[in-house]
Image (tube, helix red, strand yellow):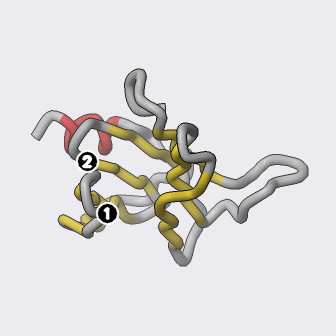
Amino acid sequence: MLYRCNILAIVGGGSSPMYPSNKVMLWDEQQAKCIAELTFRTDVKGLRLKSDKIIVILEEKIYVYNFSDIALIDHIETIKNPKGLEEFGEVLLSL
């Protein structure tokens, strides 16, 4: 959830997932609908939201999106990160 607003970020996974584990769905609870969908080639390992950025952490890449229009700002190659350690995302959020 992004602070106390009505936007939720949902990543698929688990024993009986509604969505695949390589998708991020941005859900607006007030409108009761999906407002954006991000699909990747590999599973999403971590996700961070800020008022102006969305950080998606994959095993070997990090994608940074502008929150207002879901435009890709940058993508960064990283070392192998199988657990989706959020230190990478935390560094980007501080920028």
Instruction: Residue at 41%, 54% (x, y): give it.
Output: 56
Residue 81: image x %, image y %? 46, 53
For disc 2, the marked residue is 53
Q: Amino acid at mark 1?
A: Ile
In the image, residue 55 above or below residue 48: below
Instruction: Residue at 28%, 59% (x, y): give it.
Output: 65
The residue closer to the viewer here, 88 or 31, is 31
Q: Secondary structure at mark 1?
A: loop
Q: Residue furthest right?
A: 16
Q: Amino acid at mark 2?
A: Lys
In the image, residue 48 above or below residue 42: above
The residue closer to the viewer here, 7 or 80, is 7
Instruction: Residue at 21%, 44% (x, y): give it.
Output: 52
Question: Local crowd at mark 1 within 10 Å, few (<14), some, or many (≥20)?
Answer: some
Query: Which one is earlier in the sequence, the residue at label 1 or at label 2?
Result: 2
Q: Quadrant of residue 48?
A: top left
Q: Secondary structure at mark 2?
A: strand
The residue closer to the viewer here, 46 or 54, is 54
User: Alpha carbon of mark 1 to alpha carbon of mark 2: how far?
Assistant: 9 Å
For disc 1, the marked residue is 70
In the image, residue 53 above or below residue 51: below
Residue 64: image x %, image y %? 27, 58
Q: Quadrant of the C terminus?
A: top left
Q: Residue furthest top?
A: 4
Q: Quadrant of residue 61?
A: bottom left
41 left or right of 12 in image: left
Q: Quadrant of residue 5?
A: top left
Q: Residue furthest left?
A: 95
Residue 4: image x %, image y %? 41, 22
Q: Nearer the viewer, mark 1 or mark 2?
A: 1
